Amino acid sequence: MVYARNCGTMFGLYSVTSSLRHTVRGGVEAFQLDLLQKTNESTMLSNMEDRWVWDLNGDGVFQVFLDRLPTRSNLQHRGVQVSDSLCSICSSAQEDSSHLFFSCSLVTDVVRLVCRWWNLSWSPLGSYSDWLIWFNSIRLNSKVKGSLEGVFLCFLVECMDVSESAALLDANPS
């Protein structure tokens, strides 16, 4: 059971399945749910306050910079069987962090539209380092620039979610 420490009430989440958006359809989903439930059974949560807080200052972006994200290319390097190493969004190049966030045709089209929406000039970039140099060169009010950074980071998280979902569906559960 999950307790809310600050208000002293119990939420009543008795199982993982009660928190899912839709019922498990079988196959890979059933395997992953079973694995998650077994992991949850053996996990003990400590009664201490959380020590990590997510914000938009970019602390976790180091994973993009170091290419540590679970892209299809990285999954293959770690021994995970993936049916195809091509980008799950455009299927035109090997899916690594640089391609997924900076070269994929759909991503560059959306980023171009975001730049048009914010009245910014855009030229294609090849890496997170290039993006950071470009972003730091933008002259905007700090609050406005923080909002723009949030837009970009949310979009990149969505790109990664699409990629991870496709990779998990392709992964061999055995």
Image: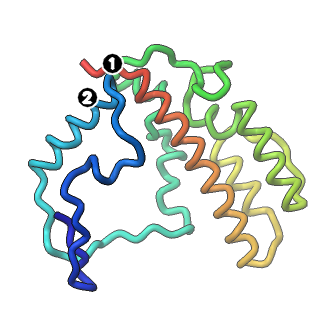
The residue depicted at 50 percent of the width and 39 percent of the height is 67
Most foreground residue, 76 or 118: 118
The residue depicted at 27 percent of the width and 85 percent of the height is 7
Quarter of the view holding residue 13:
bottom left
**Image height of 63 relative to 71, above or below:** below
User: Reading the chain from its start, which is encountered first: label 1 or label 2?
Assistant: 2
- Whether the residues at callouts 1 and 2 have beta carbons within 8 Å, the answer is no
Q: Is residue 3 left or right of residue 160?
A: left
x, y percentage for residue 108?
Answer: 76, 39
> In what quadrant of the picture does the C terminus appear?
top left
Residue sitting at the far bottom: 7
Q: Is residue 171 left or right of residue 100?
A: left
Q: Is residue 144 left or right of residue 49?
A: right
Q: Look at label 2 and name its amino acid.
A: Phe
**Image height of 113 relative to 95, above or below:** below
Say what secondary structure mark 2 lies in.
helix
Q: Look at label 1 and name its amino acid.
A: Asn
The residue depicted at 20 percent of the width and 72 percent of the height is 3
x, y percentage for residue 1?
Answer: 16, 63
x, y percentage for residue 18?
Answer: 29, 52
x, y percentage for residue 23?
Answer: 36, 39
**Image height of 137 relative to 167, above or below:** below
Q: Is residue 44 left or right of residue 169?
A: left
Most foreground residue, 32 or 135: 32
Judging by the rendered image, the residue that carries numbered circle 2 is: 31
Most foreground residue, 96 or 36: 36
Query: What label does residue 172 carry, if any?
Result: 1
Nearer the observer: mark 1 or 2; the answer is: 2
From mark 1 to mark 2, how far is it between C-alphas?
10 Å
